[in-house]
Amino acid sequence: MKKITAFSLLSMMAAGTAVAQTDSAALERFVKQSQPLCERQPAQQCIDAFWTYADLDRDNALNLSEVQRIRSVVELWVVEKGKTMPPRDRSSILMGIMMVDSAGLPTLFNNYDTSGDGKLSQKELFADVKLDNRPLPQILADRNAVDMPATKVKLGALGPLLDGMLTRR
Ligand SMILES: [Ca+2]
């Protein structure tokens, strides 16, 4: 009896690892496919690609567990890629995860979920960004396209960091 329990525990753990590695591989594919699209195509295409990747239950919105999953998968992916990733990219992603964790992902989620229905729509996520036909990174770097005061409020504890990041550009 004990053996069966240990075995099923082991296989559960193995299954868990397999799922995690598949998740990380899926993220790798998503990043590779979306990078050229996000750099060159109108922002909406990049957002739609992200949504297709992130919205697991296909209800057109992201719930907290979908967002938490992305956070975990990104961490796993960075750890797995390890030294094959440029150190600067690696440390900025890990720094991002640390910042999100210190602010608290559920808190950030609730700040963006302005309707309070537990789901994040594209509209809510980009409520403070004036999207146009430029690629998303260009829009996000444009102070006139991003409502900074509103974004700072939503980022809460991370708000002050936004100034630092912008002055470094
Ligand atoms: Ca969803």
Image: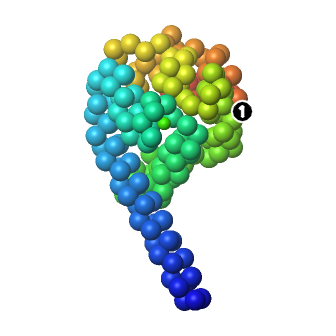
Q: Residues within 10 Å of mark 1 (few under 14, many from 20)?
A: some
Q: Quadrant of the N terminus?
A: bottom right
| Image position of 81 with respect to 119: above or below | below
Residue 55: percent from left, percent from top: 44, 38
- 125 relative to 98, above or below: above
- The spot of residue 70 in percent (x, y) is 49, 45
The amino acid type found where label 1 is placed reads Ala
**Disc 1 residue: CB within 8 Å of ligand 1:** no
Expressed as whole percent of the image width and height from the top left, the position of residue 37 reads 29, 31
**In the figure, is residue 88 to the left or right of 159?**
left
Q: Residue shown at 62%/28% (left/top)?
A: 117
Numbered marks: total: 1
Q: How is the image coloured?
A: rainbow
Residue 131 image point, x, y percent: 43, 15
Q: Which of 139 and 2 lies nearest the eye of the viewer?
A: 2
Q: Residue at x 33, y 14 (%)?
A: 133
- Compared across the picture, whether 150 is left or right of 28 comes to right
Is 32 above or below relative to 115? below
Q: Give whichever of 85, 33 is nearer the camera.
A: 33
Please say whether residue 83 is visible from this viewpoint: no
Image quadrant where residue 33 sits: top left
- Secondary element under disc 1, as helix, strand or loop, is helix
Residue that sits furthest to the front in the current view: 1
Given residues 114 and 3, the one toward you in this image is 3
Q: Write the residue at 69% across / 35% down.
A: 107
The residue drawn where x is 50% and y is 20% is 123
- Furthest toward the top, the residue is 144
Residue ID for mark 1: 157
Residue 47 is at least partly visible in this image: yes
